[in-house]
Amino acid sequence: MVAVLSKRIIACLDVRDGNLAKSIKFVDTKDIGDPVSKAREYYEDGLDELVFYDITASSDARDIMLDVVEQVASQVYIPFSVGGGIRSVEDAHKLLWAGAEKINVNSAAVKRPELIAECAHAIGNQNTVLSMDILKATMSRELPSGYEVVINGGRTPTGVDALQWALRGEELGAGELVLNSIDADGTREGYDINLTRMISEAVSIPVIASGGAGKPEHLLEVLTQGKADAALVASMVHYGDYTISGLKAWLSEQGVKVRTRY
Amino acid sequence: MPVIVDYDAGNVRSVQRACQQVGLDATISADPEVVRAADKLIFPGVGSATSAIDTLADRGLDEAILAFYASGRPLLGICLGLQILLEHTEEGDKNCLGLVRGVCERFEFADRSIKVPHIGWNQLVIEKPHPMFADIRSGDEFYFVHSYYARPLDNSQVLGTTEYGDTNFCSVIGKDNLFATQFHLEKSGELGLKLLSGFARWSPC
């Protein structure tokens, strides 16, 4: 008998100028509330983890984000990670000091892969998450997996193959991977199962599926067929269509091991 | 005064906030004298053991922690703060404080679907009763983030275990006035806070 971990349900909060925002396919962003009170609400409802993405890239907004992190950390006692605009070990240290458990590197790591190794060395592999924005592409010699890594909020193609980047990230010391499917982001039509399964089977670090969750069935699908270790949710809970505890109770009924005592 | 040991191993402020929640007004300090004089000591930690052990030694905190333990006052180790209490860790092939006999080893699984690090929520099985477990039941889940695990030589010091892959590992160590958890009780929701609150009340005799 092999003991497996509970599958994690992670809520993703995009923060713009201190407000909770939500985009569709990474554009058309709307402000939809206060991230700190949302975080607390989900925490009380049995959420396993939180991810904050700072989607304001300007440097003066950086301090607003640190303030949000501080406030969340004093109200929420589950792990949370922060991503968006992390370019150096110093950025990572500031966020950890403010109370984040882990940091997510994304675009800056594509431009300068050593950033992953530097963060892993400074704050530990476990706390260094590689977040990848991924777009479907035509399979080619350069993109053998048929998926391409994009950067700068999904706007800039890189010519880097998603599967190869995932493996490279693991080798450089990332402790976890977040796979953001930009094709699926905000559509509520389901995760990219093919992408998630392909990468999850290839790496030996945990994989978090992101983008496209709209119904409980989507979570079930990505946590079983997609072989994800965790499923990220956003719109489906932010707008009140589903609750964290409701999702977990349903998944548990379907035989998925989730944390139900809290 | 309760003190949290600061040796640049990450999450001291998360621990401090959780302490505040349970009414423990703890100071963060890197000063060996403050550590020695604490009435309760919390030894947390996130990250790489290699640099952590060097930092502890550079600051004279290793000796201070051992002296604190010898005083009989309550000592709480968390995650890396548990691992460093053993004699040796495979991580960077480092000698540690040696307060608990045994070593730390890396998780190795033949089955690649069992991921390392062990990141996420997993169940604690209580092996031996302890006053700090007052509000905790076997099967309660806590948050883990680690690639190495402790193997204490003396089985009677294993208060709790957790199963991952085909490995049943020690997730709570107890020895006299020491209580140490591999999981992050400061990140384990309300159950973690209950355990921390148990530490606030604990007076080892």
Image (spheres, rainbow, N blue to C red):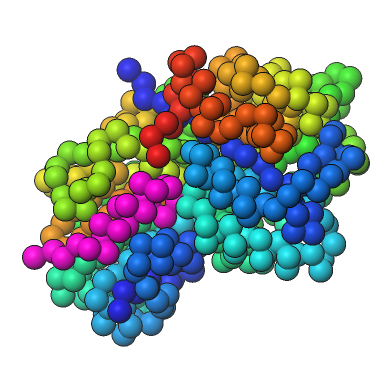
Q: Is residue A76 above or below residue A253?
A: below
Residue B160 place in picture, x, y as percent: 23, 42
Quadrant (top left, top right, bottom left, bottom right) of the C terminus of chain B: bottom left
Q: Residue at x 48, y 24 (%)?
A: A249
Q: Is residue B133 above or below residue A217?
A: below
Pick the front one: A60 or B152 = A60
Q: Quadrant of residue B76?
A: bottom left
Q: Residue at x 53, y 27 (%)?
A: A246
Q: Is residue A187 above or below residue B35?
A: above
Q: Examine the residues drawn in magenta and state their main secondary structure.
A: helix
Residue B155 place in picture, x, y as percent: 14, 43
Residue A147 place in picture, x, y as percent: 80, 26
Mark yes or no: residue A175 visible. Answer: no
Q: Name the residue at the bottom extreme.
A: B33
Magenta region, residue range? B185-205
Asked if residue B191 is among those painted magenta in the image, a careful observer would answer: yes
Q: Quadrant of residue A199?
A: top right
- A164 displayed left or right of B70: right
Q: Is residue A27 above or below residue A221?
A: below
Q: Residue at x 32, y 57 (%)?
A: B196
